[in-house]
Amino acid sequence: MKSLVQDFLAQLQGRQGSLARANGTFFSAQVVNTALQRIRLDMLDGSELTEQGYHFVHGAAAYLAWLSYGSMKKRGIATTSDIQLDANPPALSISAQRLREGQQEFYTQHVLSDVYELLLRPPHYFPSLYGTLYPLETLNIPTPEYLYLYGLYLMQSPRAEGNWPHGNQSGGSDEDFTASRHLLVDDLHRDTGLPLDDATLRALSWWLVFPPYGWDMNEGQCYNMMTLIDQIAVHPALPAADGITYLQALLGCQMAVIRFLAVRTLLVLGIAPRNLEESHIYRNTLAAPDHAAAAVAMEHAQWLLEDQGDATAPEDWASHCQQQWQQVMQRAPHPSWQDDPIFNRAEFQRLDTLDPSDHQAAVSILTPLMHAMPDHWFIRCAMGTYLMPEIDPLRGESLLRSCLRDAPEACLDAHSSLAARLKWQGKTKQAMQIFEAAVLHCPWQQESVDGCMWLLSEGLTYKVRGANT
């Protein structure tokens, strides 16, 4: 299994940014989610895996099994793995056994078959914990990999074989449930750089790693957010500054649901992002699909902070909260290039009024600007983007490459435009190099990671004739 995991991770090296790290924690299931996203979309659209695709998926399954194997070993449970990739069908499973209260207990999970049946073609309802089905349309629900590994970590997957005790709750017996939560808190702290031995911070994290009512009953992360607000600001269990430091550390978690929870709590507390990376995470949170549901919880939390008792919030309370959060975001750091006066010029703003496919009209607008400011990197970037597809590909590529040379950290548009057009020209190796450079300069930008993963997935599936389009 180790060689499969190493081969799989080697393909992802330098291509997944700062929000998908193979650090061996539960939260690094994000590595597999990022790697499989295009393959899943292709297969849901009727494609099948190529031979190379099967090998890639085997590596992803081995990685998930490796994470679970590690959690079982941490419990002190005798654990083994069985890999038979040459069999028909191929198999990769992990097993655990222990002697407890005089009875031999067994647990086996067929990880590879689960990956094929659950992760690549997820059903409408996703089985995660014992006796529980999570509807995938719930907006704030984690990825399939998150849910699958959650059940595996708690040793409570409904697809497992053996006589492992289920107990009276979804986390299994009291002993197993407590051990699982401690392991998940440990992993959260390792993933975000928080201390492992701080009892107060661990108590806060205790509420985050296992929502007591299940993810589908925690719309907008209301329960977790109210707990954090209460423990940090209403009935503080620690100094306010320490609570804010804790929330800011959570912004580095690989799981989006944890980052979103931290941002929402920080916004309610009126804390602005400290740097460009945090600004990006804040904006992604505000643009998340479940923001409308989350905003209700945030408004309730902010009303709680006002110490209004049983008073009813006025009708304009929601708009008042939205204004406060916007004021927080106005204090957020932003790239210096966004202050460039070029964006206020009327001729440049005319580009937004054009049909996006009318590249020639855009070139006509940009040409006099290029003559007036030949060294302006954003004008060169825009001109290169419009020239490269059909009008003058060689000049367009040259302009975009000059932008990358002169302003690599600022000009993410040049990275995306150049890499996309190189891909369309069949120059996938060059396109990958551009996307990798973008990930290096802005490792928190999911768009660049998506570009790398899209190219990495090229050729891993093929379209079946007659499949849905």
Image (cartoon, rainbow, N blue to C red):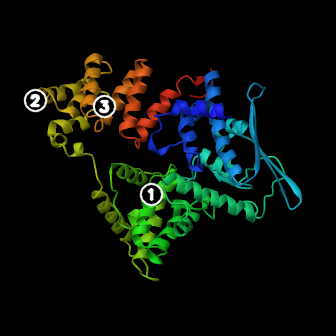
Q: Residue tagged by mark 1?
A: 249
Judge whether 358 appears above or below 209 on screen. Answer: above
Q: Which of pointers 3 and 1 lies earlier in the amino acid sequence? A: 1
Q: Residue tagged by mark 2?
A: 372
In 3D space, how far apart are the residues under numbered discs 3 and 1 (Cα atoms)?
31 Å
Give the structural element (helix, strand or loop) at label 1.
Answer: helix
Q: Which of pointers 2 and 3 lies earlier in the amino acid sequence? A: 2
Residue in the image at 50% along x and 65% along y? 225
Give the class, few, some or many, for how many residues have Cα within 10 Å of label 3's Cα (few <14, many ≥20).
Answer: many
| 466 or 67: nearer the viewer | 67
- Mark whose residue sits in front, 2 or 3: 3
Residue in the image at 73% along x and 53% along y? 76
Q: Amino acid at mark 2?
A: Ala
Q: Amino acid at mark 1?
A: Ala
Q: Amino acid at mark 3?
A: Ala
Q: Position of residue 93 (x, y in %)?
A: 75, 39
Q: Residue tagged by mark 3?
A: 414
- Please state, as top left, top right, bottom left or bottom right, where the N terminus lies in the image: top right
Q: Position of residue 244 (x, y in %)?
A: 41, 65
Q: Position of residue 238 (x, y in %)?
A: 46, 73
Give the structural element (helix, strand or loop) at label 2.
Answer: helix
Give the class, few, some or many, for how many residues have Cα within 10 Å of label 2's Cα (few <14, many ≥20).
Answer: few
In 3D space, how far apart are the residues under numbered discs 2 and 3 (Cα atoms)?
21 Å
Give the structural element (helix, strand or loop) at label 3.
Answer: helix
In 3D space, how far apart are the residues under numbered discs 2 and 1 (Cα atoms)?
46 Å
Residue in the image at 35% along x and 64% along y? 271
Q: Which of pointers 2 and 1 lies earlier in the amino acid sequence? A: 1
